[in-house]
């Protein structure tokens, strides 16, 4: 077994912002807030604080949130949790996102004030356009983002769910202002590898844009817990239960391989799935697993502390490919 206890930081694209290969996604802390908030359990602030502290104690240095995650609920919960853990703005990196749906780029300078208000003293290291759907062009959006950067309100610019053509347009618009496109945050995990064939990954590599992989453990399916105990599915809301149940038997061969490799590293299935994601493509991909429990945040952080061998990365690749 190869171990690597010192965590190597990675640059967000061509910026000077350094993040650990795994950050904590805090969409799950939006429970109760707005439309998205209704999709998550309501977690007490005390438990949110403990989840955030567990991530920090495990070595995680950054957090991913968004306006869409409860219209401020996730951002505010994060700021409270960081303060409870004794952290100040100097200690952490925060990425958040502008909600573009049914809006134009003219909303960007207004929305930023709310983001800064909810983050309560923590600054925005990376600000993303959350979706490709808005009434404005990517050029207009990137110009508004560049204005924020030049005004010192954010440190870097990113996009999310952008296809290769839109990534190129965003990259070119920012380049005219002398600003790199730092990240494209997209759906990527061992059961969902479309970005490897639709041009997103290749475009990111070519342009020097970091890929931030969201839903890295397929909302729990890649942890093996539902394979080991299908009765757990009954606790899930209907929208999650149906797709999990449908995919349980189909994905079992991959879970079996992850479990076998996990034993060799004294790791968990989730940790092997995360480790594969941050190492299969060199340093191009970082990821932001979500957590509703302290143990999950601890496990996510622990996934940065060992190294899968080249042979193990390939073996996982081959089994996972058969499921695409
Ligand atoms: N840009 C976008 O459009 C977009 C879209 C989605 C998400 N995101 C971001 O990506 C982050 C993560 O994505 P995600 O939450 O969709 O998916 P995910 O990270 O694959 O799944 C997180 C869920 O999996 C379960 N889990 C996590 N670690 C576990 C472990 N070690 N053992 C057992 N169960 C575990 C927990 O759910 P239970 O406790 O319920 O089992 C947790 O809430 C979000 O927080 C958000 O910041 C971005």
Image (cartoon, rainbow, N blue to C red):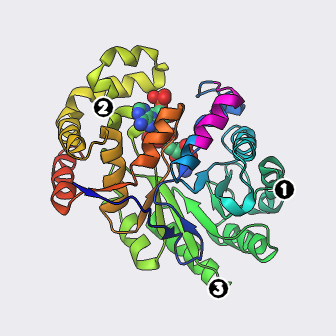
Q: Is residue 194 above or below residue 11?
A: above
Query: Is residue 201 part of the magenta span, yes or no?
Result: no
Q: Are marks 3 and 2 in contact (CB under 8 Å)?
A: no
Crowd rating for badge 3 (residues with CA inside 10 Å; few <14, some 14–19, many 20+): few
Nearer the camera: disc 1 or disc 3: 1
Q: Are marks 1 and 3 in contact (CB under 8 Å)?
A: no
Label 2, secondary structure: give it.
Answer: loop
For the residue with label 2, is its CB less than 8 Å from the closest atom of ligand 1?
no
Quarter occupied by residue 40: top right
Query: Is residue 47 part of the magenta span, yes or no?
Result: yes
Q: Residue at x 22, y 40 (%)?
A: 263
For the residue with label 1, is its CB less than 8 Å from the closest atom of ligand 1?
no
Mark sitting earlier along the chain (1/3): 1
Residue 59 visible to an observer of this rendering: yes
Disc ID at residue 176? 3
Instruction: Give the image location of residue 290, x and y in percent.
Output: 51, 41
Q: Are marks 2 and 1 in contact (CB under 8 Å)?
A: no
Which residue range is magenta in the image? 42-53
Mark sitting earlier along the chain (2/1): 1
Q: Residue at x 59, y 37 (%)?
A: 51
Residue 219 visible to an observer of this rendering: no
Q: CA distance from mark 3 to mark 2?
A: 46 Å
For the residue with label 3, is its CB less than 8 Å from the closest atom of ligand 1?
no
| Secondary structure character of the magenta stretch overall | helix
Towards the viewer: 109 or 222: 222
Instruction: Give the image location of residue 83, x and y in percent.
Output: 75, 46
Q: CA distance from mark 1 to mark 3?
A: 25 Å
Residue pointed to by mark 2: 224
Residue pointed to by mark 1: 113
Instruction: Give the image location of residue 117, x and y in percent.
Output: 84, 50
């Amino acid at each position: 077994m190869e171990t690597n206890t010192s965590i190597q930081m990675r640059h967000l694209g061509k910026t000077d912002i350094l993040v650990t290969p795994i950050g904590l996604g805090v969409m799950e802390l939006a429970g109760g807030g707005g439309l998205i908030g209704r999709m998550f359990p309501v977690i007490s602030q005390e438990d949110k604080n403990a989840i955030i502290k567990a991530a920090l104690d495990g070595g995680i240095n950054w957090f991913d949130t968004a306006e869409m995650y409860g219209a401020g609920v996730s951002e505010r919960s994060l700021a409270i949790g960081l303060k409870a853990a004794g952290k100040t703005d100097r200690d952490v990196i925060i990425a958040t996102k502008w909600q573009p749906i049914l809006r134009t780029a003219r909303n960007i300078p207004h929305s930023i004030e709310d983001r800064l208000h909810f983050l309560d003293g923590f600054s925005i290291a990376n600000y993303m356009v959350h979706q490709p759907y808005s009434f404005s062009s990517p050029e207009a959006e990137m110009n508004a983002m560049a204005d924020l950067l030049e005004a010192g309100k954010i440190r870097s610019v990113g996009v999310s769910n952008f296809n290769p053509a839109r990534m190129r347009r965003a990259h070119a618009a920012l380049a005219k202002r002398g600003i790199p496109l730092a990240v494209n945050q997209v759906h990527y995990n061992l059961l969902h590898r479309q970005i490897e064939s639709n041009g997103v990954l290749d475009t990111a590599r070519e342009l020097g844009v970091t890929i931030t992989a969201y839903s890295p453990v397929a909302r729990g399916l890649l942890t093996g817990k539902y394979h080991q105990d299908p009765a757990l599915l009954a606790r899930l809301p209907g929208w999650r239960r149906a797709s999990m149940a449908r995919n349980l038997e189909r994905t079992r061969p991959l879970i079996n391989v992850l479990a076998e490799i996990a034993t060799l590293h004294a790791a968990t299935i989730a940790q092997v799935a995360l480790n594969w994601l941050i190492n299969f493509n060199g340093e191009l991909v970082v990821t932001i697993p979500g957590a509703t429990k302290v143990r999950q945040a601890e496990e996510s952080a622990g996934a940065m502390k060992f190294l899968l061998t080249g042979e193990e990365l390939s073996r996982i690749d081959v089994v996972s490919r058969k499921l695409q």
